Image (tube, helix red, strand yellow):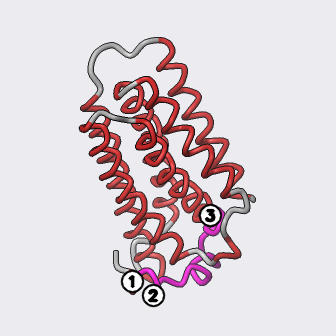
Amino acid sequence: MSDATAHAIDVQAIASDVPDLLGDLRSDHAGETGAVMIYRGILAVARDPELRAFASAHMRTEARHLDLLSELLPRRERSRLLPIWRVAGFLTGFLPALFGPGAVYATIDAVETFVDQHYEEQIRKLPTEGRGGALRAALMECQADEVHHRDEARAATVGHVGFFIRAWTWAVGAGSAAAVAAARRI
């Protein structure tokens, strides 16, 4: 989606028809901020060329999503907790990268599984046509990218996922849900 198209979407007008839209977009903006930082965290430590290429490519996509949401969401409507989301995102990438590609791919799978569901909930609220249709289409594009990231991470995961990785990915999923709940309000 181009910046001109994003600029043409009147979020305030759509919000009058769609309950909690600004909170949803606030959580999306916070999430995409965190996503960019996840990949920065991975790149801060990862030395594996394939993992670095994976992280670099995905970071570019997440940065495009962040640019889109920054264009859509007025600054005054953004989460006041962005510094926390930046640190949390960085650590969510940095920590598994210390343990290697398997831990990173499992983390990305967990994050993107959550994000897919999160976007789906929002997409279902939006009309297919009219002033909400363009926003719906934009969120569907973001969702498709996130599903691609999840599937790519899942395909790169090899072997058995042990207890610690399962516990970590559970914590990542629970943390993502808590972050969305907070970002919708603050």
For badge 2, the amino acid type reads Ala
Residue 113 position by quadrant? top left
Would you place residue 80 above or below residue 159 in this image? below
- Asked whether the beta carbons under mark 1 and mark 3 sit within 8 Å of each other, the answer is no
Name the residue: 50% across, 36% down.
94
For badge 1, the amino acid type reads Thr
Name the residue: 40% across, 71% down.
128
Q: Secondary structure at mark 3?
A: helix
Q: Secondary structure at mark 2?
A: helix
Name the residue: 56% across, 62% down.
29
Q: CA distance from mark 2 to mark 3?
A: 18 Å
- Asked whether the beta carbons under mark 2 and mark 3 sit within 8 Å of each other, the answer is no
How many C-alpha atoms fall within 10 Å of the one at disc 3: few (<14), some, or many (≥20)? many
Q: CA distance from mark 1 to mark 3?
A: 19 Å
Q: Which residues are magenta?
A: 5-23
* Residue labelled with disc 2: 8
